[in-house]
Amino acid sequence: MAEIEIRLPKMGESVTEATITNWLKEVGDTVEMDEPLVEVATDKVDNELPSEAEGVLVKKLYEVDDVVQVGDVIAVISTDGDAAAPTTDSAPAAVEAAPVEAEVVAAVAAPINGTSVDLPKSGGNGRFYSPLVRSIAKTEGISIEQLEAIEGSGENNRVTKKDILNFIENGGGTAAVAPAKEVAKAAPVKATAPAKAAIHTPEVPIYEGDEVIEMDRMRKLIADHMVMSVQTSPHVTSYVEADVTNLVMWRNKIKNSFLEKEGEKMTFTPIFMEAIIKAIKDFPGVNVSVSGNNIIKRKDINLGMATALPSGNLIVPVIKKADTLNLVGLAKSVNDLANRARGNKLGSDDISGGTYTVTNVGTFGNVMGTPIINQPQVAILALGAIRKIPAVIETPQGDTIGIRHKMFLSHSYDHRVVDGALGGMFVKRVADYLEQFDINREL
């Protein structure tokens, strides 16, 4: 019987794992080439994975809610049309069943000496632990014995991310150490891993008439990413006010002809992005990432554009190599990504690889904001609302008062590698480019 292994494909340069959210085919079902086989979710986007072969699904190696690493085999398809009997045993558990005892002993007996140890994929009770659960357990210093004591809420009593986080929140992990005699029986461990400082959040009261709404998966991911960013980067924000009167007048003058000629709307966003790209070329120190004690200077300028979704959530599609596009190209890219984002049609590659992010808080009438850095980037620029305000106008004949279009630019940056001088000069340079916009410019 010819069998084809279906592997989790690469879904973006920064994506290393995905969660199985729904199997679209069951064991024994016929599968056509390129027919959707399974739905997966990464920390960035949801995807349907098409079948890479035509035949019968004979094995599913992971269940719903399992976390799978890129390159792992997730299913097997028979091209001879022979269906295997359905089985609920997943391959990872079966493969690891034999050496479980040795792995458990090795994991427990290994000296910790201030560092965490790798945990086996299965415990003595045969229960499989996903890569995500093992990663959290390793970080928090949770032993295999403690993992086995957790009551799992997943299928077949499997421990989910929620289960292990609840365990930690309730005092588990390095803070919950087994009695000395039991540790001695298990292995000659000399020291326990250092405990991480727990973040205690106040208990929130619920009053009569309140409605409790559980966060959806995307909102949870956004929340985790924002908390991680603030914990990773010391944020500093610089503000500059820009006079964009010429820019506004030019855009109003050409928007109808541009729509007729290109079939696209000319919004303010691509004009702002053009100025930002020029400023990044002048100050490439904001187009970097931090890896340990190393600074990674990015070759390309890949602009992320924060986009609000109808659901109220947020996604950041990326214009790749934005510095190679002219204003027309930027306008078309902005419109395309925004439309596909709102239609939930973005792929993983569309939202990966960003090197600098722009968020337009002015869309909602906000004058300014203090944006949170989109890790692993080191800076983000918020564009405030354009307002007509009275302003002093300097002329050769003296100062006068006039009505001008003005906006605030808010630049948040990682103070580990971007100091106030660089962060401030960068946002001022963006403002300079916007103020110097040629009202007679030809497209």
Image: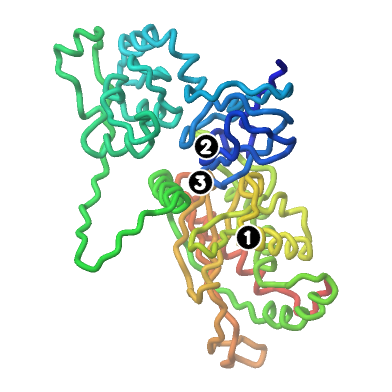
CA gap between label 1 and label 3 equals 25 Å
Q: Quadrant of residue 17?
A: top right
Depth order, front residue of 49/136: 49
**Marking on residue 90:** none
Quadrant position of the N terminus in the picture? top right
User: Where's residue 297, x and y in %?
Assistant: 62, 41
User: Where's residue 288, x and y in %?
Assistant: 58, 44
Q: Tags 1 and 3 in contact by the CB under 8 Å rule? A: no
CA gap between label 1 and label 2 equals 22 Å
How many neighbours does mark 3 have within 10 angstroms: few (below 14), some (14-19), or many (20 or more)?
many
Residue 395 sits above or below residue 358 on the image: below
SS of the residue at dot 2? strand
- Which of the two discs, 1 and 3, labels the residue nearer the N terminus? 1
User: Where's residue 318, x and y in %?
Assistant: 64, 52
- Which of the two discs, 1 and 2, labels the residue nearer the N terminus? 2
Q: Which residue is mark 3?
A: 375
Please, what is the three-letter code of the amino acid marked with disc 1? Gly
User: Where's residue 195, x and y in %?
Assistant: 26, 29
CA gap between label 2 and label 3 equals 24 Å
Quadrant position of the C terminus in the picture? bottom right
